Amino acid sequence: MEKTALFIDAENISHKYIEQIIAKFEHIEVKKAYGNFGAVQLKPWVNICSRFAIEVVYQEKLVKSKSNAADIALTVGVMESLYVSPIDTFAIASSDSDFAALVHFLRRNGKKVIGFGNNTASAKHYFDDFYILGKQNTIPKVKNKSIASVDTYYLALVKEAVETHNMQKLDSLKQWMLVPIFIEYSTLQKKQLGVSKLYQYFKYHDQHFKMQKAPDGGFLVSLH
C-alpha cells in the first residue's frame, strides 16, 4: 500500500476543512499539525487533532520575526519523514508560499506531493496535485448518521453503486461503468455530492475511482 504523510500548517488552514482533506486518502501513515496552539484562534484545532488522531506539534512564537516557527518546524518534519520513513506521497495543507522550495525538493527526490489550500495560494502550481479547500465541500448536513464525515457517507454510497454496476451490468466493458447508467441507478443527486457535474466528483476522489473516455464521447468510471 502506498504510504502517505500529511503535514498541516494550522496557522494558515482552517480546522473546518480537515474532513475534506482526510477524505482524499484511503490511509494516512503520518498526520501532523503545526502551530502555536496556545493562541485563541487555534483552539479549535486541538479538538480536531484529537478527533482525527493528528499529532500536535506545538510551536510558540517567542519573538517577532518574519520567519514563522511553525513553517520551519513543518519543513523539518517533512525532511525527517523523507529520510527516516518510507513515505511515497507527501500532503501539505497550507496556503503559504514559503513551501515552494520544499515541494520542489520532494519532487526532485521522486516523491508525489499533494497540496491543499485556498484559491490564492501562490505555490499551488509547484504541486503534483493541488486541491482548493471549500470549493467542493458544499455537501449538506445529514442527520442521525454515526460517521465523522458527511462526504465519507456519500462516498461509500457512490462506491457501492459503482461496484454493483461493475459486477452486474458491464462485464463486457472490462468492469467499466457508463456514467449515464449510474445516474439512472443511483438515488443520489449531484447537489448532494457538492458538484455541478458528476465527473467533478470522480475527479476529486481520483484515489477511489478511475476514469477514461468512452467511445460515445462520454466517460467511463470504475473503482481502483
Image (spheres, rainbow, N blue to C red):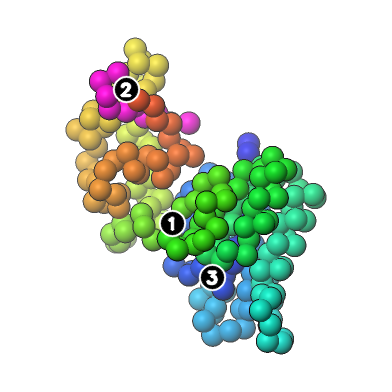
What is the x, y in percent for residue 53?
A: 60, 61
Within the image, what quadrant is residue 2 found in?
Answer: top right
- In the rendered structure, which amino acid carries the disc numbered 3? Asn
Label 3 crowd (10 A; few <14 / some 14-19 / many >=20):
some
Q: Could you give the CA–CA distance between mark 2 and mark 1, rounded to whole angstroms?
A: 28 Å
The tag earlier along the polypeptide, 2 or 3, is: 3
- In the rendered structure, which amino acid carries the disc numbered 1? Ile
Q: Could you give the CA–CA distance between mark 3 and mark 1, rounded to whole angstroms?
A: 13 Å
Apparent side of residue 34 relative to residue 216 in the rendered image (left or right): right
The tag earlier along the polypeptide, 2 or 1, is: 1
Q: Which structural element holds mark 2?
A: loop
Question: Which residue in the protein does label 3 denote?
Answer: 12
Question: Which residue in the protein does label 2 denote?
Answer: 214
- In the rendered structure, which amino acid carries the disc numbered 2? Ala
- Indicate whether residue 218 is drawn in magenta: yes
What is the x, y in percent for residue 120?
A: 45, 63
State whether residue 58 appears in this view: no
- Indicate whether residue 125 is drawn in magenta: no
Within the image, what quadrant is residue 164 found in?
Answer: top left
State whether residue 127 appears in this view: yes
Vertical arrangement, residue 111 with respect to residue 39, above or below: above
Quarter of the image that includes the N terminus: top right
Question: Which residue in the protein does label 1 denote?
Answer: 132
- In the depicted view, which residue is nearer to us: 102 or 90? 102
Label 1 crowd (10 A; few <14 / some 14-19 / many >=20):
some
Please state the extent of the stretch shown in magenta in the rendering: 214-224
Apparent side of residue 5 relative to residue 125 in the rendered image (left or right): right
Residue at the (32%, 39%) spot, across then down: 199
